[in-house]
Image (tube, rainbow, N blue to C red):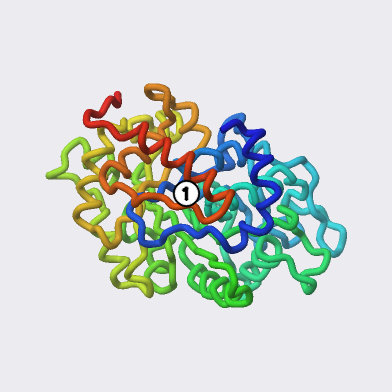
Amino acid sequence: MAFKSLLTATMAASSLLASSTFAVDLGSKTNLAVYYGQGPYQERLAHFCQQSSLDIIPISFVHIFPDQGAGGYPGSNFGNQCSSEVYENEDGVPTELYKDCHQIAEDIPICQAAGKTVLLSLGGATSAYKLDSSKSARDFADFLWGAFGPKTASWGDKPRPFGDAVINGFDFDIEHNGDFGYATMVNRLRSRYREDPGKKYYISAAPQCPPDDKQLAVPIMTSYFDFIFVQFYNTYYCSARSWVTNPRRSEFSFDEWVKVIKRSPNPSARIYIGLAASVNATYDDNYYLSPLEVLPLAATFMTKHPKNFGGIMLWEATYSENNQINGKSYADHMKKILYELSPPPPMTSTSKISSTTSKISSTSISTWTTSTSTWT
């Protein structure tokens, strides 16, 4: 379906459907999470939301936290999706929080109406963030809820970078400066979620692959996360590449992360195999796996841990789109793998807009299902 027709079909229904009709299947083994916001010369968010392969889209990043941010505000970077205008704080001090992100604001409801779960990702590879106190953690959670959660009269004219659009939750991609305050922040967000009981909100984490990850292992064990997007591509000994190279001797840590989850407040949380979507998506192209290499990896751990395997996570959407293999993006190949390992049930139409989405998905599935793989 062309972008223009998707836009036309969904805009009229998006405000009604986005808030309640669609929710990601927490129990699925075939979800595909794909980060968006840091790709080179990236297309608009809605461009990726027309692709039936994607289920969860974390928008990255809020990469500066209030304790370090200019004017006491957080800072954001969503690539080419915002203008250069920033918010000023109450004293007129310019901050690093981008103000005019109208393309994302327009696209989030379209994505949600197409069945996508849209998260806001915090952190990233930069080291310019940490929480200085428990109060900072609670205050930051309150700011995020006011700025990106449901619009309320009590929030007044405070920042709303995505306008009236409401995200589906928050992703913690914390890679530096320790674990202090994140469990407090998660718990505070959970308490704020209860203010909008008609809508389901989520929290995810994207730890590095060592199971004792210094930033997120403790928060995961002490607070409630829905999805765990483990980055199996930055640390060799526990990486997906190490398993592919030598499964018998690898310290690939999916099993260990299952143990972490089983000791957490949500022992049913789903773990995703996080992969680089192309050779250019990470600092070392050796971490990239071809679809043929991913297939036995996903098959092994989906079979071994059916109650905790959630799917695959990719960094990142634009890198995936630029990595065309036999005419399909890397994300399409990952979804094909997941569906071949665990075929989805037949889709049914519940509304005009969902009928359109189902038709796209079922057509894609029938195209992908083959007796012989043709990946390279």
The residue labelled by disc 1 is 55
Residue 298, image quadrant = top left
322 above or below 210? above
**Left or right of 370 on screen, residue 72:** right
Looking at the rendered image, the quarter that the C terminus falls into is top left
Question: Which residue is found at the position 21% from the left and 40% from the top?
Answer: 296
Comparing 332 with 222, the one in front is 332
Identify the element where label 1 is drawn: loop
Residue 21, image quadrant = bottom right
Looking at the rendered image, the quarter that the N terminus falls into is top right
Report whether residue 119 is seen: yes
**Left or right of 78 on screen, residue 338:** left
Q: Amino acid at mark 1?
A: Asp
139 above or below 370? below
Indicate the position of residue 65 as horizontal and vertical percent values.
Answer: 63, 59
Indicate the position of residue 7 as horizontal and vertical percent values.
Answer: 66, 40
